[in-house]
Image (cartoon, helix red, strand yellow):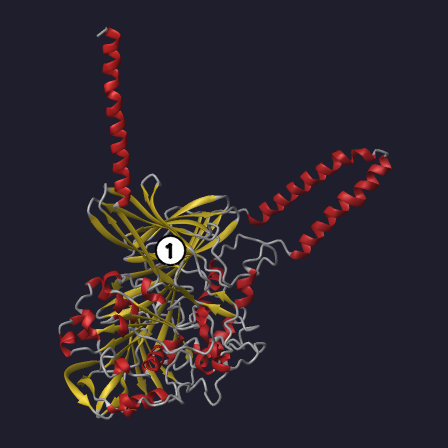
Amino acid sequence: MTRQTFVRSRNNRGRPSRFLLLLALLLTSTTARAVLQFDVFIGYDGIVREASWFPVMCEIKNDGLPISGFVEISPGNYNKGQTYQIAVELPTGTLKRVTIPVFSPSRQISIWNIRLTDRRGKTIAEQTAQRPRRQIGWEIPLIGSLSRTASGAATLRPIQRDQDDAKPAAARLLPQIFPDNPLVLEGLNALYLNTEIVAGLRESQADAILGWMNAGGHLIVGMEQVSDVTASPWLRNVLPCEPKTLKTITAHTELQSWLRSRLDYVNPNAAQINQQFNPQVPRRSGRQAQRENVSAEAPFAEQPDDTAFELADIQVATGTLRDGRVVVSAGGAPLVITSNRGKGRLTVLMFSPEREPFKSWKNLPTMWSRLVEVPGTLYASADYYQGSGQSADGIFGAMIDSRQVHKLPIGWLLILLVVYLVIIGPFDQWWLKRIGKPMLTWITFPCYVVLFSLLIYFIGYKLRAGESEYTELHLVDVLRNGDKAELRGRTYASIYAPSNAKFLLESKQKFATFRGEFLGYGSEATERATVLQNGDSFSAEVFVPVWTSQLFTSDWWSGSAAPFDIVIKPRGDGWNVIVKNNTDHAVKSAQLVIENRVVTLAEIAAGGTLNMNLTREQGTALAEFVRQYGSNFQRVSQQRQNAFGASKGGRLSDIPNTAAAASFLSQMRPDQNYNNMRFISSPGLDLSQYVERGGAVLLAWTPGFSPVTSLNQFKPRRFAKNTLWRIPVSVGP
């Protein structure tokens, strides 16, 4: 063998080795991708509610190489809105479930892109163009079920109108993927919990349920076994009764009689829905026609009896009643008990709706519809028409938007336009003809354009240039939890930028979410923001264009010492009210909402106590108070979105009273709310339902104070913060 042949043979030995190495790497990469499972679950069993937070749960199983990266959720509609991210670490052989709170900006079906990326942003797995199964309006009830069986989940009676976003919805929730963030649960009006499921819930999930209920949710507990309650301290302590034994009841006609009776519940949207008919919609025949002799006040009056159910025995838990009231009883035993809990309610079914004879009861969907408080109008007529609505965010934006932004009045804009047209047209022609050089128009016309462009920029600079500004308004619901309190806050933050800039915002609260301004009208969000979830809190980077004031909102939960101690005792013709201010800031304005009246209280010094006797004739009717300070809400909300107009348009100056009025928006009935326009508010913002159930609310205004660390991670030239405390109070015996 020659030397050249030996060298060629030795060099060729390495080529198969390199080929095999590349093939092995390719197979390894393909295998790594194949062993990654990336599943996405949107909403509550695929149901999403407008103007509320909903969970997006990602289940990731990694049997391949370790992964360090992010789960990213972005809108699929032309890349509008904000992007949500959460960091994930996925060692080999792990299964992780991560839940990301996402805000629903519309009642129309939304599209979302969900990706798993590495630290460099390279996509590892993705689920594109994901849609919820159903999307419903903000005013439509939604119940979730933690049921013992799949067939035992709550089902609602069908309504008259065949419109998907107007149909009340029911979703079955699985304990394994049930959220432990109370903010994410606020899209639910009600939650059915079977006592047999309680033992399998984590402590964090139980805390989320209690927090959601105290903030305004309706928890419905179905009694499976007495031992389920005794084995669960958190459930046993919160129930309005103490179950002890099971009792068999033979005659129980009272339950079906209750279904046929007049509705006795208070729904803050029911009054609006009852008046939201479209007179131009023709009457329909068949199922969609208005049911004769059926009223919205008693929509189930014609409900027929179920003979088989009436002949069957039912098993009911009996015991000691602690508080609340009995809604239905039979055979001397309560069947349904309800009680207020914070801003919300707890209803106990002393039977299991998942066992016979309830399981086969033909009227079971009607019972659920009544418990969930579906407005009776939806069953009495098919002519309900939701119409359009404005966002309540615009009201708070009008309170805190920067006053540095001045608008050019329409009159001056028209004058400027007329002058521009006159100069580039008749004046230019006359002047060039006079000097005998008409061809110079090729030079003068561009000069006019440049001159007026500079003039417009100068006018805009004079009207809007200013200093960076950051303003916060906190609406804080104080929910008592023993000797301490849970604070459910809404922080409205306005940023004014004198130049195109990005700003960092961050929350340190136990639970916190972040979103841009909700616009209503079915509009999509237009802000540019990236939100990184840090556990159950967040940090965000937002972009604010030059000379604009943009509104952002953070919803949060935090534990705290009770900022106020309040006692209200009835006395003869009124009440004795004692309020102790435990904070180190004075309350400059205080109002008590009780029995649908608003009574102004005196200032309360820091650490001071207020003791007042009030009569029932004092104050102003709640509806009149809301009309007085909310009469221009619609006009102001619209004007603040306009680029031109009067400088004072789109502004609300009396923040304490307007913020108080905005806490009872459902008092503005559609016929009073100018052109039948309604305000769309997020769950829990409206306090009307709590007051109409017999509770009282103290509204305390503390200027220059924030109960939590401010969100801004930058130093603005101008800074302001104010807080409106909203404290629900039970009226003592």
Asked where in the image residue 325 lies, by quadrant, the reply is: bottom left
What residue is shown with label 1? 514
What residue is rendered at 40% in x and 77% in y?
158
In this picture, residue 6 sits left or right of residue 272: left
Q: Is residue 562 visible?
A: no
Asked where in the image residue 134 lies, by quadrant, the reply is: bottom left
Q: Is residue 644 visible?
A: yes
Q: Position of residue 424 (x, y in %)?
A: 75, 43
Q: Position of residue 32 (x, y in %)?
A: 26, 41
What residue is rendered at 35% in x and 40% in y?
122
In this picture, residue 182 sits left or right of residue 596: left
In this picture, residue 10 sits left or right of residue 434: left
Classify 433 as above or below 692: above
- Quarter in which the C terminus is drawn: bottom left
Classify 718 as above or below 178: above
Q: Amino acid at mark 1?
A: Phe
Asked where in the image residue 432 lies, by quadrant, the reply is: top right
What residue is rendered at 73% in x and 51% in y?
418
Q: Residue furthest top?
A: 2
Q: Position of residue 240 (x, y in %)?
A: 22, 80
Q: Residues within 10 Å of mark 1 (few under 14, many from 20)?
A: many
Q: Position of residue 708 (x, y in %)?
A: 32, 57
Q: How many numbered marks, from 0 up?
A: 1
Q: Residue furthest front?
A: 1
Front-lying residue, 720 or 689:
689
Q: Secondary structure at mark 1?
A: strand
Front-lying residue, 615 or 259:
259
Classify 88 as above or below 659: above
Front-lying residue, 327 or 457:
327
- Quarter in which the N terminus is drawn: top left
Classify 75 as above or below 173: above
